[in-house]
Image (cartoon, grey):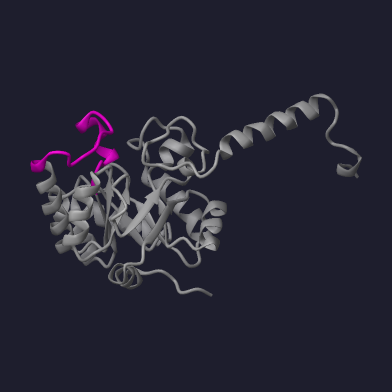
Amino acid sequence: MAEKININKLNEMKTNGEKITMLTAYDYLMASQLDECGIDLILVGDSVGNVVIGYENTIPVTMEEMIHHCKAVTRGAKRAMVIGDLPFMSYQVSAEEAVKNAGRLLKEGGVKAVKLEGGKEILGTITKIVDAGIPVMGHLGLTPQSINKFGGYGVRGGGEKEAKKMIEDAKELESAGVFSIVLEKVPAKLAKRITDQIAVPTIGIGAGVDCDGQVLVTHDMLGLFEKFKPKFSKRYAEIGKEMKTCYKNYIKEVKNKEFPAEEHSY
């Protein structure tokens, strides 16, 4: 069996300049496919709310929903390191509650680490979680759980003042003990500055090629989720359209008594 991915391996990859690959998964089948293909990290993102459950955004996602999907994904991942998102209001109320919920994702969901959004304002919370023996991935730039605060999904860190704060946040997250930081919708030059100034790996999503790794929502890159097509997500296929063609052919054949044929019958 191939070497399992852990924090030490990720640090080694950054040191050696080997890019880290990360995609999302929300079920056993997709997780097992990603794992078999050699993905390094699997994120059970709160994006499950958008692409699987049907919510307008990530805000309504609950701990119970995250645990349910984490369980399915961890059953399918043998080599990849699985990381679970802490959903909105599972870590903002108090550090104690955050530790408890992070522990639930590990103990009940089976993940190896958790991810949470924010910078300086959550440093104390991150420290508490890390001190409890739970690995934490940070998340800066566009933070979808704060969509109502920012009023949109625009690029973050465009101005020098905001860029300076993000660099400071990244350094403080590293000091608080995160093992990696996701940089979402950040100008490529700023993402490179952050990547060069911290020792832990950066994972970009709409943050340019100089991050230590890349992550996409799998449903986006496969063309499964057709309602939203972000600029930063390359469409490697249009599987959603192909699936609809299959459904329509099935419906037509059943209506026309073409299926089941003799070879499909007992």
Q: Residue at x 13, y 45 (%)?
A: 163
Horizontal arrangement in the rendering, residue 161 relative to residue 112 (left or right): left
- Percent x, y of residue 222: 51, 43
Question: What range is drawn magenta here?
Answer: 140-161
Q: Is residue 262 magenta?
A: no
- Percent x, y of residue 228: 42, 32
Look at the picture and state if 227 lies above or below 109. above
Q: Is residue 146 magenta?
A: yes
Horizontal arrangement in the rendering, residue 181 relative to residue 173 (left or right): right
Q: Residue at x 33, y 68 (%)?
A: 10
Q: Residue at x 74, y 28 (%)?
A: 251
Q: Residue at x 56, y 56 (%)?
A: 33
| Residue toward you, 234 or 61 | 234
- Percent x, y of residue 8: 32, 73
| Residue toward you, 241 or 181 | 241
| Residue toward you, 33 or 64 | 33
Horizontal arrangement in the rendering, residue 38 relative to residue 84 (left or right): right
Look at the picture and state if 200 lies above or below 258. below
What is the quadrant of the C terminus in the image? top right
